[in-house]
Image (cartoon, rainbow, N blue to C red):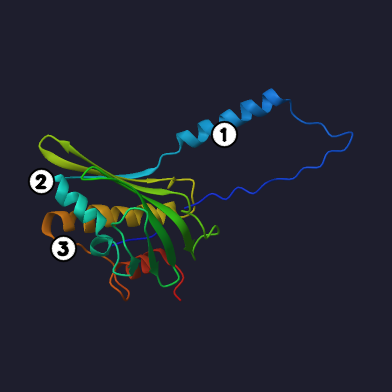
Amino acid sequence: MKRILLAVIVAPVIVSFSNTTSFKPEHENSINNTKTKNNMKESKDYTSTILVEQNPVTVFNAIKNFRAWWSEEIEGNTDKLNETFFYHYQDVHLSKIKLIEIVPNKKLVYEVLDNEFNFVKDKREWIGTKLIFDISNENGKTKMQFTHEGLVPEYECYSVCQDAWTSYIQGSLKSLITTGKGKPNAKVGGLNAELVEKWGLPKK
């Protein structure tokens, strides 16, 4: 199977002007800023959707139980509002995540507070992104849409991360919902070990 996890760090730019320095008029800067915002809007966040026979309560409770579908290597509460939990797989991926919104049986939103990868240049990719789980009814079934807001194709980790999330959502979480048993990373190795092997990630 597969796994793993973004942030954009924008550093301030200091520019010194001499008497001969020319700069763009304010209206041109506004145009450029608008173009940048439009480009950002065009970036598509990663999403994955499942449709199951189980009721929204079952789906909601399964999502909150991250240890049962994502990883047994989790410290802290994954189901309490405003509390954080810590996930890690060796030093390949470490992440601190906070539950910031709960709408019972309808929605869960988690924010990535801190993150570190050892296989991309920007080790802090994911920081500030959100894991959003929306639950709704569709033709008598329960629809669960997962969105990793901020995980977009422009990021270096995207190929690995979207591969991993697809496996977790379509495989492990769906299995937990429909059979009562997920396929999380084991405390030692587990599915993340397969991902490290598949993508040729550093082993430490």
Residue indicated by mark 3 = 181
Give neighbour class at mark 2: few <14, some 14-19, many 20+ (Cα, 10 Å).
few
Q: Residue at x 38, y 65 (%)?
A: 87
Q: Residue furthest top?
A: 27
Q: Which numbered disc, 1 or 3, marks the residue that appears first in the sequence?
A: 1
**Label 1: which residue?**
36
30 sits left or right of 71 in the view: right
Element marked by disc 3: loop
Instruction: Assign a secondary structure to mark 2.
Output: loop
Reading the chain from its start, which is encountered first: label 3 or label 2? 2
Tell me which residue sits at (39%, 68%) in the image: 88
Pointers 1 and 3 in contact (CB under 8 A)? no
Tag 3: amino acid: Lys
Q: Which of the marked residues, 1 or 2, is nearer the chain's N terminus?
A: 1
Question: Which residue is the site of mark 2?
Answer: 53
91 left or right of 192 in image:
right
Badge 1 marks a residue whose secondary structure is: helix
At which x and y percent is residue 75? Answer: 35, 68
Q: Residues within 10 Å of mark 1 (few under 14, many from 20)?
A: few
State the residue at coordinates (30%, 56%): 80
Q: Foreground: 103 or 69?
A: 103
The spot of residue 17 in percent (x, y) is 83, 38
Circle 3 packing at 10 Å, graded few (<14), some (14-19), many (20+), is: some
Residue drawn at (81%, 42%) of the image: 16
Looking at the rendered structure, the number of numbered marks drawn on it comes to 3
- Quadrant of residue 168 within the rendered picture: bottom left
The quarter of the image holding the N terminus is bottom left
Q: Position of residue 113 (x, y in %)?
A: 46, 56
Q: Spatial distance from mark 3 to mark 2, Cα to Cα?
A: 16 Å
Dividing the picture into quarters, in which one does residue 175 lie? bottom left
